[in-house]
Image (cartoon, grey):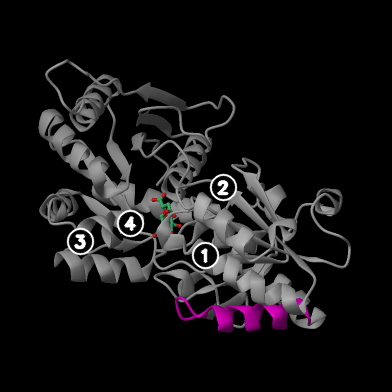
């Protein structure tokens, strides 16, 4: 099917895996000749430079004085409907159920059934928010009323079905990387800024929310650096940052840990690392582990959520039960002290990321879903 479509995409435009996936997918679709209209409250941070076939429609919120909380959701739903009518969109593809799938449902009521809605579930929209009684029924409605629903791991599908008693089919569409961007970069000179030649680098990249268990990252590092000369690099920012800093100070590790803040060129930064640490409590997929894998960096992490579908234990990293920092440290030490194992894992990471999670095949999976809901298979 080679028919070009007009697609509206809504996502969280700032830092976060769901926003990254939505934006990168939009760019890939635009490259294929589809017209892509981002509808959001600001320009998605990964959109980058001007690209043909990509348009951006900003949602403006009415903060009339009677409103205690400005109704962003209603403004978004209205904007979706306006853009759909004006641009004659074929479909809305919304990333993250709350509020985006609900707003798309409302937009469809305003536009009519010819506007199709595809909802992609990313993780905490189900694993956290669908447990909240104030949102549960609304999320179920939005899922049931979407023309297609996708989720980024088998584990997330299982949890959605169980938590919300969903009967309808949900398509599995894994996250992906663009191999033109994610490949091992030359990081030798950058590495020298943070570590001596004999030192290894452990890295953690996230939004430092409690589900990421950043304290475990520090605890694993404490055990590792007692056996192997090493440095720990934190990339990102978020609410647990003060706690991390406090723990590092308490443990006397301040001269071995660096904070890089938010970074745009993640492939360049990850390429410095010997290990990516992902000890999360919840993680529907773990996009950062895929980004690391594509740069040849194995993950030491937890068995949470969809991580085992991505990181193959013993092949592209090592996984331990959530909170088992002793086992994670042992695995990290094993990897850092065995050059053959490290080289084999690096090769396995590159193979797996570039073959099994390649942008072109996953973009095609989404296109097939679009054509299916439009009855144009
Ligand atoms: O990891 C986060 O907290 C951000 C969150 C988001 O919604 O942006 O990430 C979720 O979606 C990513 C893209 O599909 C997944 O790779 C992450 O695993 C997922 N996060 C969680 O499930 C905690």
| Pointer 4 residue | 124
- Label 1 within 8 A of ligand 1 by Cβ: no
Q: Where is residue 57 in the image (x, y as percent from the top left)?
A: 36, 23
Q: How far apart in space, not on screen, are marks 4 and 3 (Cα)? A: 10 Å
| Pointer 1 residue | 215
Give the mark nearest the N terminus, 3 or 2.
3
Q: Range of the magenta residues?
A: 320-337
Q: Do the residues labelled 4 and 3 touch (CB within 8 Å)?
A: no
Count of marks overlaid on the render: 4
Dot 3: few (<14), some (14–19), or many (≥20) neighbours within 10 Å?
some
Dot 2: few (<14), some (14–19), or many (≥20) neighbours within 10 Å?
some
Please give the name of the residue rendered at 48% of the width and 42% of the height, measured from the top-left corner. 15
Does the magenta segment cover residue 295? Answer: no
Q: How far apart in space, not on screen, are marks 3 and 2 (Cα)? A: 27 Å
Please give the name of the residue rendered at 54% of the width and 78% of the height, measured from the top-left corner. 325
Q: How far apart in space, not on screen, are marks 4 and 2 (Cα)? A: 19 Å
Give the mark nearest the N terminus, 4 or 1.
4
- Label 4 within 8 A of ligand 1 by Cβ: yes
| Pointer 3 residue | 131
Please give the name of the residue rendered at 47% of the width and 28% of the height, measured from the top-left corner. 54
């Amino acid at each position: 099917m080679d028919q070009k479509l007009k697609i509206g995409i809504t996502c969280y435009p700032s830092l976060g895996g769901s926003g990254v996936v939505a934006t990168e997918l939009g760019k890939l679709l635009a490259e294929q000749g589809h017209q892509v209209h981002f509808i959001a409250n600001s320009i998605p941070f990964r959109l980058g430079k001007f690209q043909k076939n990509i348009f951006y429609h900003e949602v403006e919120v009415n903060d009339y004085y009677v409103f205690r909380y400005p109704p962003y959701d209603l403004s978004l739903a209205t904007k979706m409907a306006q853009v759909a009518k004006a641009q004659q969109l074929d479909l809305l593809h919304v990333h993250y159920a709350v509020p985006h799938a609900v707003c798309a449902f409302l937009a469809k009521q305003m536009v009519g059934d010819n506007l199709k809605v595809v909802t992609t579930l990313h993780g905490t929209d189900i694993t956290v928010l669908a447990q909240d009684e104030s949102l549960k029924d609304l999320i179920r409605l939005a899922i049931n009323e979407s023309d297609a629903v996708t989720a980024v791991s088998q584990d997330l599908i299982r949890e959605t079905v169980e938590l919300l008693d969903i009967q309808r089919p949900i398509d599995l569409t894994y996250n992906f990387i663009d191999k033109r961007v994610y490949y091992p970069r030359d990081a030798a000179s950058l590495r020298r800024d943070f570590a001596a030649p004999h030192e290894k680098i452990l890295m953690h990249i996230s939004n430092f929310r409690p589900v990421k268990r950043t304290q475990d990252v520090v605890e694993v590092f404490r055990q590792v650096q007692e056996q192997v000369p090493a440095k720990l690099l934190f990339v990102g920012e978020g609410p647990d940052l003060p706690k991390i800093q406090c723990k590092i100070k308490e443990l006397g590790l301040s001269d071995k840990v660096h904070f890089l803040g938010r970074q745009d060129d993640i492939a360049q930064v990850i390429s410095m690392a010997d290990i990516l640490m992902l000890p999360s409590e919840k993680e529907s997929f773990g996009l950062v582990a895929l980004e690391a894998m594509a740069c040849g960096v194995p993950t030491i992490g937890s068995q949470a959520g969809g991580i085992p579908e991505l990181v193959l234990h013993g092949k592209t990293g090592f996984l331990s039960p959530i909170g088992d920092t002793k086992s994670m440290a042992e695995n990290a030490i094993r990897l850092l002290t065995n050059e053959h194992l490290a080289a084999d894992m690096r090769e396995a990471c590159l193979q797996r990321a570039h073959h099994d999670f390649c942008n072109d095949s996953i973009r095609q999976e989404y296109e097939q879903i679009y054509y299916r809901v439009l009855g144009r298979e």
